Image (cartoon, rainbow, N blue to C red):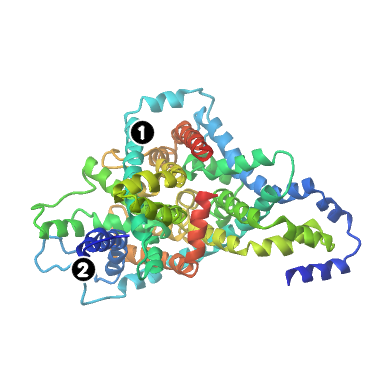
Amino acid sequence: MIEGARWRKWVFFYVPMALFLLFLLFPFYWMVITSVRPDGELYRPWNSSNYNPFWTWKPTWDHVRYLFEETLFASWLWNTTFIALASTAISLVCGVFAGYALSRLNFPFAGSLGTAIFITYLVPQTLLFIPLAEIIRNYRLGDTPWSLILTYPTFLIPFCTWIMMGYFKAVPKELEECARIDGASRWQAMLYIVIPVAVPGILSAGIFAFTLSWNEFIYALVFLSSPEQKTVPVGVTSELIRGDVFYWGPLMAGALLGSIPVAIAYSFFVEHYVAGLTGSVKG
Amino acid sequence: MAISAVSDTTLREAPPPRRQRLLEDERWLAFVLLVPTIVLLGMFIAYPFMRGILLSVTSSRVGIPGDFVGLANFYKIFNDGIFRTAVYNTFLYTGVTTVFKLALGLWLAMLLNRNFRGKAFMRAFILLPFIIPTVLSTFAWKWMFDPTFSVLNWLLYHFGLITGRINWLGDPDLAMISIIIVNIWRGVPFFAISLLAGLQTISPELNEAAAIDGAKPWQRFWHITWPLLLPVTMVVMLFSVIQTFADFQIVYVMTGGGPANATHLFATYAYQIGVGTGLLSEGAAISLAMFPVLFLIVVLQLLYIRRVEVR
């Protein structure tokens, strides 16, 4: 929609776009370059003369090696993957069922239940972490992956339900009625007719839930205490900083490697992710 | 395909057992489908919420149940200078970042709404700050703001803008600005992508018609795009404001609430008191103090959204 001279396109499009990209992506470039830069170069003051911060001629794997040999990074990766997959699975089952019930069945209190679930969607984790930590301790779940697998669904189920309701509403009633006339029970019509049609919604909700549980921090920080139980964000935070000493090389390598799985998952399902994101907003 | 599979199986299981007949009733089916959700949300949201309220009116510490003390905890935190700073910071942080996120996000969304080569690619990359675990990317920012090795200082120095170093996270005001920058960085993609989805539902013909009638680009934005985008904008703001108001991760990593407790938000201060020093009930009181504000935000925004939708 830009009319007129060529310079207008540069001023109103290319330059702002390039600045946005620089602002949004530079921290990742910085992560990458720091994680392969030898310590000798890393800790050179910013105003020393021969310092080129944006490139290194002596890339090293030392930081990555340190991560896997001196810390429990491999187990953190495994813990995070397991917890994210398990809580996503639980939330999807609950969300699909609840979304189906709320959007396609008539029963008393349907409206108020829907509102209640929407409100829990808006409850931030930081509101409840202290009483929840006590409850987790009372159920003897503290310091186990189950403390997270069971609590992450509290913020995943509401939006899974929300997204699925949107998809289920779009499935025509006639489709289900046809199956019922052919003798299928309600349960079968749901399982074999309606849910398969809503598979794109399940993928969207699933990928969104996976990234959210991979990113979760405060519950993992409060509920887990032993180093071998930790997730990547918490492990990196607590084990790579000793007092005031930051191990910047391994820290950035850990940040990078901890981001790659979720970035890969995201890259396969970009369209679904975007659909989930916008679906979770529009409803 | 799926339909034929069903009719096959149903023919074989002709007489349904009692359990199945129960599921034929819409109410029972709804109940069965909703039980897992209600149990999980009840156990880990409703119950903790009650426990939080009960906790905040006692004098519990870690390992000590404590006695009923009424509103003493709330009285204590409202007279606590650090808590007041945290309240001020939280409002400042939420207000400033929301304005910037909305402005920059909308601008980016309008840029992305054009047709250009590599658009899908660009959109995928732009979402990265939102996808990558916040704690991990915030460490990259903390390293960029490092007092001795800061690349930002290097840049400013080599462009001749500064002569000495800037101690970004050591000064209360600069630390607050740094945190605000990181939050804007993280939130812009969410605004941009959601608003882009909203923009794509606006028919380009409206803008073209206005252009033919002689409306300037700015007028077209103000009289056509903005009013049509308003419902989506309000919902995006609702989510963002709540998340920002209750934010924890960025401040925890960047400053830990320092220097000298000057950059605490509700959540980080609640963590410091409740988990750091073990004063459970006081910590619970601090995080519950967020609740009235969050509640008000939700009610106001929902009312506004309803009004916009009715109109």
Q: In the displayed structure, would residue B224 be above or below residue A86?
A: above
User: Looking at the image, which residue is at 58% across and 34% down?
Assistant: B50
Name, please, the residue furthest toward the right: B15
Q: Position of residue A107 (x, y in %)?
A: 74, 43
Q: Which structural element holds mark 1?
A: helix
Relative image position of residue A186 (x, y in whole percent): 79, 56
Q: Residues within 10 Å of mark 1 (few under 14, many from 20)?
A: many
Amino acid at dot 1: Val
The count of marks equals 2
- In the picture shown, does residue A262 fall above or below B89? below
* Residue occupied by mark 2: A54
Element under label 2?
loop
**Chain under disc 2:** A
Asked if labels 2 and 1 touch by Cβ distance under 8 angstroms, the answer is no
Please state which of residues A11 and B280 is positioned toward the viewer in this rendering. Answer: A11
Amino acid carrying mark 2 in the image: Phe
| Closest to the observer, B143 or A14 | A14
Residue A96 versus residue A72: which sits nearer the camera?
A96
Disc sitting over residue B87 in the figure: 1
> Left or right of A85: which side holds B231?
left
Q: Which mark is residue A195?
A: none
> How many neighbours does mark 2 have within 10 angstroms: few (below 14), some (14-19), or many (20 or more)?
few
Instruction: Find residue A18 and report its image quarter.
Output: bottom left
Chain of the residue on which disc 1 is drawn: B
Relative placement, left or right, of A66 versus A182 is left
Tell me the residue at 79%/67% (across/down): B6
Q: Relative to the observer, which residue lies in front, B265 or A41?
A: B265
Residue B175 position, x and y percent, is 25, 45
Q: Is residue A105 visible?
A: yes
Quadrant of the rendered image containing residue A245: bottom left
C-alpha gap between disc 1 and disc 2: 39 Å
Residue A240 visible in the shown view? no
